[in-house]
Every structure is written in C-alpha cells, then in structure tokens.
Image (spheres, helix red, strand yellow):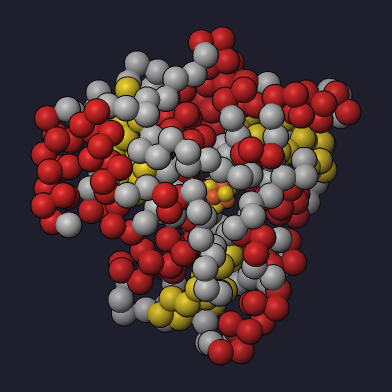
Amino acid sequence: MQALVETINKLKKEKNAVILAHCYQPVEIDLVADYVGDSLYLSQVAAKTDADMIIFAGVYFMAQTAKLLSPDKKVILPQIDAGCHMADMINYKQLLDFKAKNPGIPTVCYVNSTAEVKSECDLCCTSSNAVDVVKSLNAERVLFLPDMYLGKWVEKQLGNVEVITYPGFCPTHLQIRPADIEAARKEHPEALVLVHPECHMSVSEMADYVGSTTGIMNFAKNSDNKSFIIVTEQGVVDRLKRDMPEKEFVPVKDNIVCPSMKMTTLDDILKVLQNESNEIFVDGNVAQKAVKCIDRMLEVSK
Ligand code: 13P
Ligand code: SF4
C-alpha cells in the first residue's frame, strides 16, 4: 500500500491536485487526502483552494457542490456511481410539487441534494449549520428537504419556527433504533451517547450530544469523559479510534455503513489522477442559480 500512496502523492503534486475526503470514506483514503472532514468543512475548502484539480473522495452531491463553488477547476469523483440515497429521494419535479403545495414559504435544502434541486431553493445547509441557516431566514415557517429528521431536529432546537419537512431520510442512519442505544448504554453505562441528526428523532432524543460529523469529533476531543457510544457512520468511529487511542469509542451497532461512501479505493484515486476521468459538469443555467443558495449558506457559516 505504501508504494501506491507514494505514487498518488507524487502524481498529485505534479498535477497540482488536491484530494478532499469525507469522514465516511474508508479510513485508508486519509493516507493521500489533503483535507478530511464533514460536508461543510469540505465545501469551504473547495471554495478556497487554488489547486487546478479537486479529487473528491465522497459521494456525487459533494463533488457537484465542489464544482459549483469552483467552476473553473477540474472536479473529479473517483467512483462515479457513488450516489447518496437521501439526495436521490427528491428530484426537480418533486421539489416543485412540494413548493406548490406550500406556497410563499422560504425553502432550505440540505447539501445532500442535486444541483437542480438547489437551483430552486433559497438557502442550503449542512448538518453543522442547519440551525443557524434556518434561523437566519427570520421566518415563521420554513420548507426543509430532503431530510425530515434533520428538519424536525432543527425545529426542536429553535422552538419558534415551524419546519415543514419533505419525507426524505438516510437509510444508513435510520437503521439505528432506540433499542440499540439502550443496549449499548447497558454495556457501557459510563459512555456518553453522540448522535448525528440524520437519525430518527426517537434516537436523537436519547443523546447526550447531537451534532454533525465534525461536531461529534470535536465533542469527543474536548470532553473529559473517556468513553463514547458513536451513533453515526462507521468511518467516524474508525477515525476517532485512530486519533484518540487513549479514549474508548464504541459503534452503537455493527455495520452502520454508507455503501456509497465505501466504494472508493486508493486504486480508484490513482486511476482518476492518471486518466483525469470521472469529471463532474453542471449545466450553466442550473449552476448559476444553485451556487447562490450555497454561497448564502457559506455567508451564514463564516
Ligand atoms: P456531515 O454534514 O456531517 O458531513 O454529513 C453528511 C452526510 O452525508 C451524513 O450522512
Ligand atoms: Fe447519503 Fe446517508 Fe450516505 Fe450520508 S450516509 S451520503 S445521507 S446515504
């Protein structure tokens, strides 16, 4: 593996490419990644980089968001079939129907959505900034899509905004049930329970902390507690174990993995660096509108 890593790193320099990796990627991808983090962090990096090429080790909507933010750069997704099941739950027509049923209400889309969907929304958010984004609208009612659980969690945090949600969800996070938390707590009574807001509300309500991927990692780092039950994708558990061997990190249950995120291999990265294949393109009209809602989000998150 070392030789492969060295070849990738050499080629990356020659081509002035930067590799961005989401925390749900297989952990060995970090050996070649320049930046590893959650959706918000990686979109901030994509907006600022001066590299000529962005290799996005993640899923389609993430690479597409990077292209929207850096239209002059070559943006490449190592596994072109790595989609997001949640993002696929709402298309352009379904969005228009949802808006037509709820006219005159500002619309917030989770970054886990297509560029076409983003192009008809007012503001975008990630799980890191969803509360601040919805709050920034100063509205009594907000349409939120596609993740109904993140939307309802935001509503609960704010208390004074009605969040009307589209019925989308993440199949990976929805595998986790309250009984899983109860069982993990029984085995590790001293552990704090850290939950991603894509989980079912009944799970989030049992948490000691609810937050994005980075939120969970920072919470574990800054806490005096030594043991944590991690209620999100396995990649987060793997990185926490690697980065803080002095603490204990327990996955809430086995096999909480996002199949799309785990498709990427180091061989794929080498191949796309060599061939410059799997480039992402976005239609100009769609891009012009979609980037506005992402830029507004980045403004709120400054
Ligand atoms: P983050 O915003 O925490 O990176 O989550 C992205 C995602 O797809 C979670 O399933
Ligand atoms: Fe999409 Fe869920 Fe995978 Fe995140 S974990 S990329 S929301 S399918």
| x and y percentages locating residue 262 in the rendered image | 43, 53
| x and y percentages locating residue 125 in the rendered image | 59, 38
| x and y percentages locating residue 65 in the rendered image | 48, 30
| x and y percentages locating residue 164 in the rendered image | 81, 41
Q: Is residue 141 left or right of residue 180?
A: right
Q: Is residue 77 above or below residue 151?
A: above
Q: Is residue 274 left or right of residue 145?
A: left
Residue 225 appears anywhere in the view? no
Task: Please tell me which residue lies in front, 291 or 235.
Answer: 235
Residue at image coords 16%, 49%: 4
Residue 90: quadrant of the picture: top right
Residue 79 appears anywhere in the view? yes
Residue 19: quadrant of the picture: top left
Residue at image coords 30%, 42%: 268
> Looking at the figure, which quarter contains the N terminus?
bottom left
Task: Please tell me which residue lies in front, 59 or 229.
Answer: 59
Residue 256: quadrant of the picture: bottom right
Task: Please tell me which residue lies in front, 199 or 277.
Answer: 277
Residue at image coords 23%, 40%: 270
Residue at image coords 88%, 28%: 101
Q: Is residue 170 above or below residue 221?
A: above
